[in-house]
Amino acid sequence: MDRKVKVGIIGCGGIANGKHMPSLSKLNDVEMVAFCDLIPEKAEKAKNQYGTPDAKVYTDYHELLKDPSIEVVHVLTPNRSHAPITIDALHAGKHVMCEKPMAKTAADAKKMVEAAKETGKKLTIGYQHRHKPEAIYLKHIIDRGDLGEIYFAKAYAVRRRGTPNWGVFLNEYEQGGGPLIDIGTHSLDLTLYLMNNYEPRMVVGTKYKKVKNPECGNPWGGWAEGANKVEDSAFGFIEMKNGATIMLEASWALNTSEPIKEGSTMLCGTDAGAQIKNGATVINKGEFNRLVEIKPDFSEGGVSFYRGVSNNPGETEARSWIDAVKNDTEVVVKPEQAYVVSQILEAIYSSAETGKPVFFD
């Protein structure tokens, strides 16, 4: 029989309930056997909905990590605690899926990479937009060389209004920032992945907290006065070592009539271009003295890196991750790649604070 992978969940909040636990529950070869949260009622609720009959509940993740039967841990806590929990889990002999972004700081992300190398355990980060059918398709055609050299790209994640007001989203100490580190990180990761370019040379960044009425039209309502400690938008200009340019736009609140969903990207190459924007995918090129646009159909089927592809990227991410653990194969989101994302995000914030460019070695 196909062996069961026993999983422990650390952090039973929004992203656990919105993506990880529902996706893992779809896999017949996974058992969620332990749930940990600082609020015991959250862990109990998760156990009752997703756990095995004998699943355990904890408020201290160290106790969860002592269970030798647990092979995989999902770290789904605020950004500030990603690194210490992940590092402890790796050293406890667990494979780790850590939710995005990798860490609050680039220094912490680097420590996570080092811990994975030291322990020989697998570490991946929850950048599920790589697992969208359109991203999988574009990755194939880009790797085949259809776009040629990609020298200009845009990474978009822009909301007209959409500031999350629950949990610690508005807490700079816990999260490290606002929309840039929350949703901009997704679009940047997807763009770097499709370009297969992880060597930044220089970054210039700006950030703003300018919109006078960000609560107006916000689907989740307002927040207590003084509670919002983070930016409402941030922008980055990224020059790569090979000369390529990436523009990054991230916002929770911007006075624009054309919001762009997270996980959107535009890629311009020497032979063709492509974009994923608000769910629509277009490949553009010129041939026989005509400009041509190709719009692939992702309604069903299609190529995949692995079995069990789904139009739900969270489910495909979970299937890919568990397969990598069971078969001892490479993860799709490598920690070294996610570390570069964290470096660039931190450089944008740093440049925005100092007004100076940030150069990489």
Image: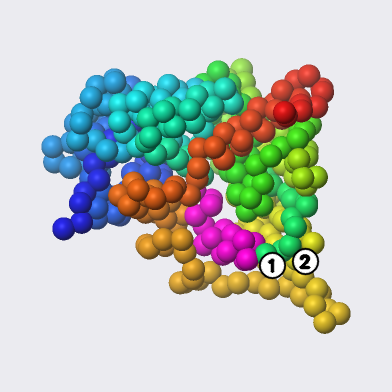
Residue, far right: 289
Residue 273: image x %, image y %?
A: 74, 63
- Image quadrant where one finds the N terminus: bottom left
Q: Is residue 131 magenta?
A: yes
Residue, far left: 54
Q: Nearer the viewer, residue 214 or 249?
A: 249
In the rendered view, does 313 fall on the left or right side of 226?
left
Q: Residues within 10 Å of mark 1 (few under 14, many from 20)?
A: some
Instruction: Give the colour scheme shown.
Output: rainbow
Residue 315: image x %, image y %?
A: 40, 54
Measure the alpha-carbon separation of dots 1 and 2: 7 Å
Q: Secondary structure at mark 1?
A: loop
Q: Is residue 332 above or below residue 361?
A: below
* Residue of label 2: 271
In the rendered view, does 21 fall on the left or right side of 6?
right
Q: Residue at x 69, y 39 (%)?
A: 199
Is residue 204 in view? Answer: yes
Q: Secondary structure at mark 2?
A: loop
Dividing the picture into quadrants, the one containing residue 139 is bottom right
Q: Nearer the viewer, residue 154 or 225?
A: 154
The total of numbered circles placed on residues is 2
Q: Residue at x 43, y 21 (%)?
A: 84
Please state the extent of the stretch shown in magenta in the rendering: 128-144
* Residue of label 1: 146
